[in-house]
Amino acid sequence: MSKELTNMSSTGKEYWRSLEQLAKTPEFEAFLHREFPEGTAEGGATFSRRNFLTLMGASLALAGLTSCRRPVEKIIPYVIAPEEIIPGIPLYYATSMPFGTEAIGLVVENHEGRPTKLEGNPKHPHSLGKANTFAQAAILDLYDPDRSQSVLYRGAEKSWSEFLTAWKALIKEYESSDGEGLAILSESFASPTLARLKKAFRQRFPKARWATYEPVSDENILSGVNIAVGEICHPVYHFEEARVILSLDSDFLQLEHDNIRNAAGFADGRRVITQDDEMNRLYVVESAMTITGGMADHRYRLQSRRIGAFTAALALELTTRDVPVSGVEALGAYTHHPFDEKWLGALADDLIRNAGRSLVVAGRRQPAEVHALALAINSALNNINRTVEYYPPGDIEMSRQEDLIALVQAANSGDVTSLVILGGNPVYNTPVDLAFKEAIDKITHTVHLSTHVDETSRHVEWHIPEAHFLECWGDVHTPEGTLSIIQPQIEPLFGGAKRKYWPP
Amino acid sequence: MAQIFPEWTNKLPPIVAGIVILVLVGTVGFFWYYGSPYYTDVGYRPEQPVPYSHKLHAGDLGLDCRYCHTGVEVSPVAGVPPTQTCMNCHVMVKPESEKLKAIRKSWETGEPMEWIRIHKVPDYAYFDHSIHINSQIGCSSCHGRIDRMEVVSLAEPLSMKWCLNCHRNPAPYIRPPGNVTNMRWVPSKDQLAFANRFISEKKIDPPTDCTGCHR
């Protein structure tokens, strides 16, 4: 048989089942001549296959009987019963979930001190009693057995106090140099407390670097707004007010910032209760099918990279219909566009007909220019402060790629001697071209705080387990400034875990 | 020509059929009975870490069940008392007793006691104490004469048939107020009249549809 297999090539077309066979490696030749693959026991001297099957058959037959015995189960009461807990009746606590720069207000179902279910807090203006997939899944994260469980020094377990000793000695060196050579790489956050701590850090180490990076962020949106109005602002959409909505590659119902409120607002605008109510109309231009695309009344398939051109064509189309979009001159003279004339024309008409009650949203994935243009269109259609509002981000810490690039350059030129990474997994999720991994290897002292031992943890000196948001105190606010408290539901499950806000 | 099979072989098929049927019925019957809660569960009385006696505490000392099983009126689970409850008395009573060693150890170390569960409804069925207690069903209807038990044992099979027997006709078990934990309660002569009045007043309607318990 093996001969046939290897000599098949003599006549006809040559077929092969693996690269090894094609290359005729010696391992493959050896493999062909063996009946069983390596690692399979071929009936040792004491235990034949038949014997094995006989015994297994008998044990299987008897295994059924063991189920007749009752499994022993324990009832474990408290030693001292906490006053407010009645076993069997869950308690509900309010907390909020920080998610990027978002704040999702939650109510946690807590059984005898163990959180079991997260739902939206009806009193929180950003979750309105609902939660999204990320909030629902966060409870699984809490109990994830793969969570990092102890402090590691170059991969070896160390105690928290050993880290503190090392850290205190290290930070002393930077006191005298005002933090020269010290750098922080943080995840984005919208927490007044963290912002205050950052300020305190800045004051103590004025020469230290600070970079904030998040692989998925609203950076493009904010810089788009900056291009358009010269000020960094966060858009907050009111889908409930909009009659006609155009989404430019924006999955605002599931993946964009504030998707819970977006979905609630969209549903409100779509709901028909009396015969006088009208439904909103959703136009979606996108490259892949999303939840939002699935809700579209009119969906236009377009490569992601051509959405900018589509937006420009729309702006020019609106301008020809006496709705001048500011900045449109920069796009040049309008002759023609390669998009569906009828679709685009109808869309422009519909937007104009509903001026002041329409909304154009662009997705995170689109470059800043598309966002600037979307703002200009909304402005031309008189939608601003009706269906979309802009808020200055205040002390929200936002992802900025240029800071990350500067940090990597400084590390490469030896200007960074210590780096503290607060959350995230930059070795894995920074752009490859940046060669973050190589840069971090050049830094003498590195500390990484994260929930899991991940790619980054393997490239650092110290790894520190991070507490889950259900395990620590904190605070977070929304773009409009609603403050909410993060209340711990349980002590950190894994002894080593320290909260982000450790005592100074 | 001689017959290949002697004459008695004519009877072989019915005999074989008879044996097969006997074996089948026997096997089914065996598992039917010995696999059922009546055999496997009723009378189950595991050894507990502390030889705690309901006969002494609930019977002779007359402690109310709710002194220890505090959740029973409000919660799905009755619960077993915390170590603290035992220590309320046993710091004074028999503080040196050998039998209470585990309790003292738990009190000193803060490690909880581990009692062995006796009453158990499978996870796929839902049971709630509070609704039964609030419908004036007494503990002894389901747990038997706990006040006479040195060691708690399973008095009822807790099978589905058993649950449904009462759910279809709860009247004989409904007690006048204040008797839920009374172990010596016996129905009075006008029990049915009282119960029927209670059932219609309070709109007692135990579920008999599958989703009532298998939710």
Image (cartoon, coloured by chain):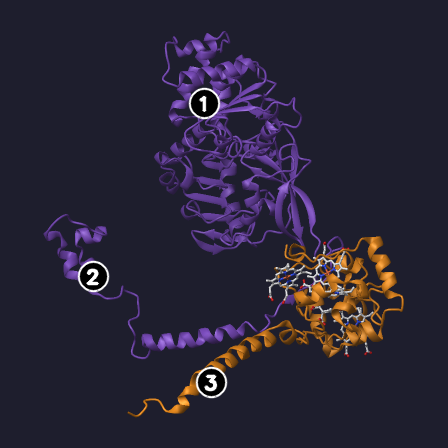
Q: Name the residue under label 3.
A: B15
Q: Which of A382 and A390 is in front in this view?
A: A382
The residue that appears at 32% across and 79% down in the rendered structure is: A46
Point out the tag, 2 or 1, that comes first from the N-terminus.
2
Q: Name the residue under label 2.
A: A32
Taking the image as shown, residue A271 lies to the left or right of residue B175, namely left
Q: Is residue B94 above or below residue A112?
A: below
Q: Colour of chain B?
A: orange
Quote the CA–CA distance across marks 2 and 1: 58 Å
Which disc number belongs to residue A368? 1
Q: In which quarter of the image is residue B7?
A: bottom left
The residue that appears at 69% across and 60% down in the rendered structure is: B127
Give the foreground label among 3 and 1: 3
Quote the CA–CA distance across marks 3 and 1: 90 Å
Residue B48 drawn at (x, y percent): 68, 74
Taking the image as shown, residue B76 lies to the left or right of residue A280, namely right
Three-letter code for the amino acid on which mark 2 is drawn: Leu
Q: Which of A128 and B103 is in front in this view?
A: A128
Quote the CA–CA distance across marks 2 and 3: 56 Å
Three-letter code for the amino acid on which mark 1 is drawn: Ala
Which chain is painted in purple?
Answer: A
Q: Same chain for marks 2 and 1?
A: yes
Which disc number belongs to residue A135? none
**Mark 3 surroundings: few (<14), some (14-19) or many (≥20) residues within 10 A:** few
